[in-house]
Amino acid sequence: MSATATSLTGAMLQWLNDHAAEGIFTTDMDLRIRSWNEWLHTATGLGASAAIGRDLFEVIPSLKERGFDAYYREALAGEVKVLSHKLHRFVVPSMRSGEQIPQSGRIAPLLEDGVVVGTITVIADVSERVVAEHELRAQIATAERARHVAEEASRVKDEFLATLSHEIRTPLNAVLGWTRILRSREHDAATLARAIEVIDRNASAQLTLISDMLDMARITAGKLRLGVGEVDLPATIKAAVDAVRPAAEARGIDIVLDASSSVPLLRGDADRLLQVFWNLLSNAVKFTDTGGHISIRITSFANEVRVAITDTGIGIAAEFLPQVFQRFKQADPSAARRHGGLGLGLALVRELVHLHGGSVGAESAGLQAGTTFTVVLPVPVAGTIARRESPPPQQKSVLSGIHILIVEDDADAREIVSTTVADAGASVTAVGSVAEALGTLRDNRSDRPDVVVADIGLPGADGYTLISEIRCLSPEEGGRLPVIAVTAYATAEDRRTALGAGFFAHIPKPFAPENLVSTIARAVEPTV
Amino acid sequence: MQLTTAQHDALVELLNIGFGRAGASLSSLTGHRVLLEVPHVAIHPIDQLNATLDEYMTGDVASVHQEFGGPVGGDAMLILDPVAASTLKELLTNEPALPLTLDASSREVLTEVGNILLNACLGTFGNLLKVPISFSVPALDVASIRAVVERLVGPAESFRYALVVTAGFRLRDAEVTGYVVIVLTVQSLTRLLVAVEEWERDQQG
């Protein structure tokens, strides 16, 4: 080596010693430290003068404690050693802010003319890299979670749409099938009764399905309001039992209601609580085999009432139990085909019970081990509300002598409304548009209707136009007539809009005949 | 050049000893039991290496390359396909892998694993030949298998052979396969095989 090259090498070594961004130390064949750069001084607090000439493992005992002495022996035999941060964390102890700085390193033989003369150890501070990778990993994990949630939501939606399609078609199939059979020829009374029963049951099933969906949408939008009043819980549960009893009896399922203990009146929405227990009992009937047993036990405590509904049905697998109240979740979507339903019932139950300040839980010892649903409802702080002896008997509405103007563009719907009110004794004028309705009012001053029952979604001028036009008429022309909306615009918002526009009442389609009749009776009450 | 059955069996036995040492190192480093399965060994002329490795993997691969020198010299490389590389890294560090290009820590772990395995193979040969073997610093590269092989083959200045050792890692109920490729000159390979036969005779004697 020329003198210039030697001096350059010396200068380079000096520079590396003073400024290298890595820790570098060398040893001889006896593993005595021969050089120790400034980086190491800063990192370990040990200066070159204190390290050079001493045994490596005496200066850094942890190297031997962690088995690196073998690495140095192998380096002296010619092997190069890689010390990754992940597997070793650090090479030499170096504290900054009280924490060990993450390091990686290399241990290599130092060769002179192909002969090993010592070792060199190079140590890098990888803290910035470790932080960057940690952040990247966290970002990827967040994105991955979001993707998983989106995929799960999409899968649940697809499953729901498949179930929805099936659930909507199934009752329609029965309705249309029987309708076609009835039209094909004359049938005896028994067949006719059977057909009507099937059509009614299937149409009701579809109504329940759509109502459940709308209720769920209202709850999701925070728009479901409870009509709070006193609730006689045992009576409500008995009504739910009565509603499901025909289906249970048809399959030989025994339902026992134990309401022996005295239960105070609760505060709540009786219709919604009926919906809760109807849903739970329908579920129990649906998932209990023929000949099974369902028991309902109502227990009253100081602050709450517990209702436990236990069936001997197919039970719930432990892994599905936590998801049983989630929307659109069914333990086995293929079973949904067998048992029907959208997977909304239990989600609705939970939401409705929560709205009452209560809770609901499910227990099952597993598949084929039956299930117990327990609803807990709070008792009002004021204590027991005085019980009514019995609910007031339902007054049968009679519309005889009442003239009703029906405004409905759909001929079938018009006929149903007409027949319903005519059966209750009313006389009917039925028209299909707002113009016809206004014409009828103007032309029949002598026999002017007592009440108007109108659809809202009419072609051209709609129900809202009708009511504003009616209110512009003179009292003699019927300007103050009560107008009842019977409409498929069935949301709470639609109801508010209709009542705000001046409709006397808002009855969603499909309507229960007795509801329409009693509403008309109320509308005409002062004049009857 | 082809391996005789005796040479093949002896090489497998010798490499298995080296693999045992590598497995023990990895076990102690990771805290998991790491086993390296009994290796498969085959010799291919260097110009057939591309076709041979094409059978095992395509596309980009992660490779740890080390040159070695001394009385016996050549190139040694551990090659893992990207899935195997990620899986191995995940299994060793118990942490999800990032894409290798973004994850210097993963590249470092794989470099260390390659280093341990290559040292075990070549160290075995050094001990057998009773000659010191020196190593270059290992380097990890992510490139197409063709580019990797081209780098190994280089200019065809001498007639060389590639010893291809299939390395099956077993850890935490999973299996990852990598390939150790050791490129040797005819002279080096001949020396090695002579030493292998002597060792075999010593074992029997």
Image: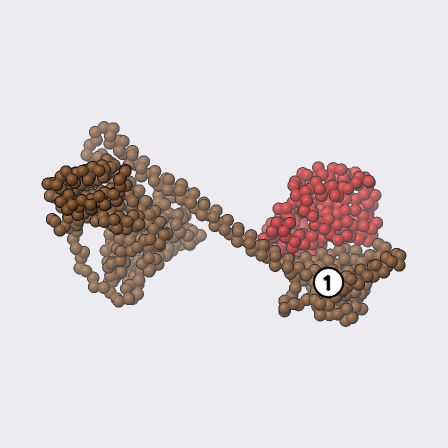
Chain colours: A brown, B red
**Residue B43 visible, this angle:** no
Locate residue A80: give its quadrant: bottom right
Tell me the kind of residue under disc 1: Gly
The correct choice, above or below, for A50 with respect to B4 in the image is below
Q: Which residue, as the protein is rendered here, is positioned at the far right? A: A2
As drawn, is A323 to the left or to the right of A499?
right
The correct choice, above or below, for B42 with respect to A298 in the image is above
- Percent position of residue B92, x then y: 63, 54
Q: Which residue is mark 1?
A: A23
Give the total of numbered labels.
Answer: 1
| Frontmost residue, A461 versus A106 | A461
As drawn, is A371 to the left or to the right of A468?
right
| Frontmost residue, A343 versus B120 | A343
**Residue A157 visible, this angle:** yes
Q: Residue at x 71, y 42 (%)?
A: B147
- Percent position of residue A41, x then y: 73, 68
Q: Secondary structure at mark 1?
A: strand
Locate residue A333: give its quadrant: top left
| Frontmost residue, A522 versus B19 | A522
| Frontmost residue, A10 versus A224 | A10
Q: Residue at x 80, y 52 (%)?
A: B133
Q: Which residue, as the protein is rendered here, is positioned at the far top? A: A185
Q: Which chain letter matches label 1?
A: A
- Percent position of residue B151, x then y: 74, 43
